[in-house]
Amino acid sequence: MGIKVEKLAKEMNLEVVISGNKDNEISVSDTSRPGLQFTGYYDYFAFSRLQILGLVEMSYLATLSPEIREERFKQFFEFDIPCVIITRDLEPHIELLEEAKKHNVWVLKSKMITTRLISKIMNYIDRELAESTSVHGVLVNVYGVGILISGRSGIGKSEIALELIKRGHMLVTDDAVEIKNIDGVLHGTSPYITSGMLEVRGMGIMDIAALYGLSSILEEKTIDFIIELEEWNGEKDYDRLGAANEKREILGVPVTMIKLPIRPGRNVAVIIEAAAANYRYSNTSKETPLEKVEKRMNEVMDMNNTNKLS
């Protein structure tokens, strides 16, 4: 899997100086600044990366005679290079353009400084090349916490999301959640077609932005934990202390999962709000509520033992 150079140029707003092979792709997010190669040293040359020519490289090339520049570029373009990008709106040398045309290699330009462009390009490529999947569920942003609500079809995920939106929280996506693993962090987004939409059985599709304003939707959110909805089963022993720490793996990343039984009269939206608040609390507190209870129980037992001895 790779990114077409033509797509990169369009997405990053780069000027096309020479249009190369349409099939050229970028398959790694790392970049290369080939100053050392222009001196003639090609050991360990990472030619498959984007080749970035900044002020240092262009200034060095300007010190060479046209004949030597031509020789260096001939050697440089013998490698299967996907693309050359010139920064700071610097003018490319004619020898570079001639060899790029011969080898059908893209040459692009940017007005940005080199370090800023490299950072921007690497972030973009990392996102585009990230491992991805799609899962069934609803992704919401509650108190800044990304919660993936899962459960069987028809259990009420969308209705709960609608209640959360009414309470001031934000919808990321309904029904289908597109997930990317970027450096071990899961990022959830909505498919383009259903972006900002919510389907409620019996009512149909609702345009959330039109009904509740743009502040009610969010384009992307990291997934912090999962709430799995299931029908209440009176014979099942549910976790009452918060000691259970079940995980669900998505794209190789373990995500904390809370199984939440639902039944008529139970305000699930309020419970999800509490779960989000508890998640934020647990990330900042050194002691969990369960640990506090256990500590108090030990204190009471110690007091009782002391009274017995006295």
Image (cartoon, rainbow, N blue to C red):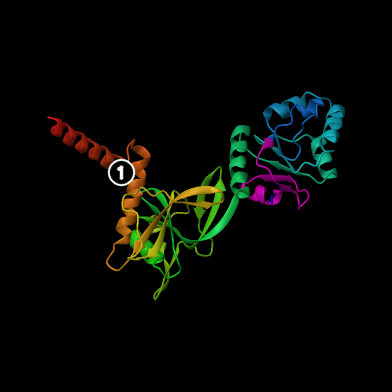
Tell me what residue is drawn at x 78 percent, y 44 percent: 105
The quarter of the picture where residue 124 lies is: top right
Tell me what residue is drawn at x 77 percent, y 31 percent: 44
Q: Is residue 10 magenta?
A: yes
Which residue is at the far bottom? 202
The quarter of the picture where residue 49 lies is: top right
Residue 64, horizontal then vertical, whole percent:
81, 24
Residue 132, horizontal then vertical, whole percent:
58, 53
Q: List the residue tagged with mark 1.
A: 290
Total numbered labels placed on residues in the image? 1
Residue 255, horizontal then vertical, whole percent:
47, 49
Segment colored magenta: 4-31
Q: Is residue 273 left or right of residue 109?
A: left
Which of the pair 199/102 is nearer the observer?
199
Image quarter of the C terminus = top left
Q: Secondary structure at mark 1?
A: helix
Query: How many C-alpha atoms fall within 10 Å of the one at disc 1: few (<14), some, or many (≥20)?
Result: few
Residue 222, horizontal then vertical, whole percent:
47, 48
Observer able to see residue 66? yes
Tell me what residue is drawn at x 83 percent, y 39 percent: 99
Observer able to see residue 167? no
Which residue is at the far top? 63
Q: Is residue 58 magenta?
A: no
Which residue is at the far left? 310
Which of the pair 84/64 is nearer the observer?
84
Is 223 above or below relative to 291? below
Q: Is residue 221 left or right of residue 17?
A: left
Tell me what residue is drawn at x 39 percent, y 50 percent: 244
Q: Is residue 133 left or right of residue 195?
A: right
The amino acid type, in three-letter code, at marker 1 is Leu
The quarter of the picture where residue 119 lies is: top right
